Amino acid sequence: MAAVAEPIAVAPAGSESRRRWMRVAAYAVLIAYALLMFVPFAWSVSTSFKPNAEVLQLNWIPENPTLEGYVTAWTRLTPPLPRAFFNTFVIAASVTISNVVLGSLAGYAFSRLRFPGRDVLFVAVLATMMIPDPMRIVPVYNILLNLGLVGRGIGGYLGVILVLSIHATSIFLMRQYFLSIPRDLEEAARIDGAGHFETFWKVILPLATPALAAVAILQFQGTWNNFIWPLILLRDPSQWTLTQAMAQFRFTFQTEWAPLMAVVVMATIPIVVLYVFFQRYFVEGIAASGVKG
């Protein structure tokens, strides 16, 4: 007896059209939001090319474009612009490396190792994210002062790096990503005689490139724009970062907007370049870090 073919379900034309319009609406909202987020940077670029007489005018294209703002930023900045870039890069790179190393080690411990109080300790780590920096200034400052990590010399750099050396966000992202890696790979390494650290270094860590990139971008960008800790711990003007250098263009009764925006534009370029090159890893790492809880 011949088999009777089952009818193929066909989605109603109205349902397909509805999904298409919903997709178009979603893209329209996302594009509009992206443009809205781009407006402040575009306005900064426009203002950086305006003369002082035009900075308060609501025109996107300067009537008399000039490089005066960039010249002022280059000649009057303290420390000089190359030095400010160097100070900021040294601190941001050191903090990024520290967060990648310590965050991956802690994330592996919280995701793969079993020890008493593991979950309670992880919750305590996450709770630190709810404590704003202003609430930690006094105790942290006293500790660093007693250690000689406040003021001039290399101690000021070390103080800022030590305060920002590990963040709960880095541990959380790495832990969540490690949880998404199948345990079969780890068990196979154990059968071959690998210990915890060898398994972490040769098996787990090479698979976590997207999460490492996400942590690196987040911490580099956050440290690059950090203002409060360099302001408190760095007393030598030659050690100031870009955010501290920008502050000198703001006074009690006026603000020099053109040079200030010029520094903002130049300080934003490294972050944009970093994100463009690592965008794929960043998005993949953020997405995969929310797979398991």
Image (cartoon, grey):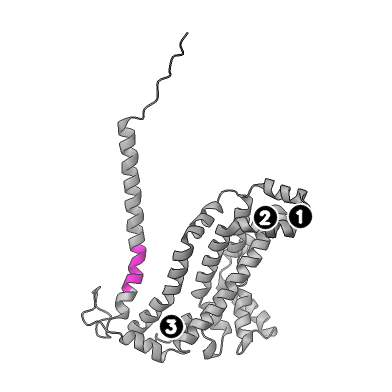
**At numbered mark 2, what does the secondary structure look like: helix, strand or loop?**
helix
| Residue identified by numbered label 3 | 246
Query: Residue 165 placed where, x, y %?
Result: 62, 72
Mark 2 or 3, closer to the camera = 2
In front here: 227 or 12? 12
Query: Which of pointers 1 and 3 indicates the residue nearer the eye?
Result: 1
Q: Residue furthest left?
A: 63
- Left or right of 156, for residue 263: left
Residue identifier under label 2: 203
Q: Which residue was labeled with disc 1?
A: 194
Q: Quadrant of residue 30 in the image?
A: bottom left
Mark 2 → mark 3, Cα distance in angstroms? 44 Å
Secondary structure under the numbered disc 1 in the rendered image? loop
Residue 102 placement (x, y as % from top left) = 66, 66
Classify mark 3: residues with Cα within 10 Å, few (<14), some (14-19) or many (20+).
Answer: many
Residue 37 part of the magenta-drawn span: yes
Left or right relative to 142: residue 32? left
Residue at (75, 53) in percent of width and height: 114
Three-letter amino acid code of the residue under disc 3: Met
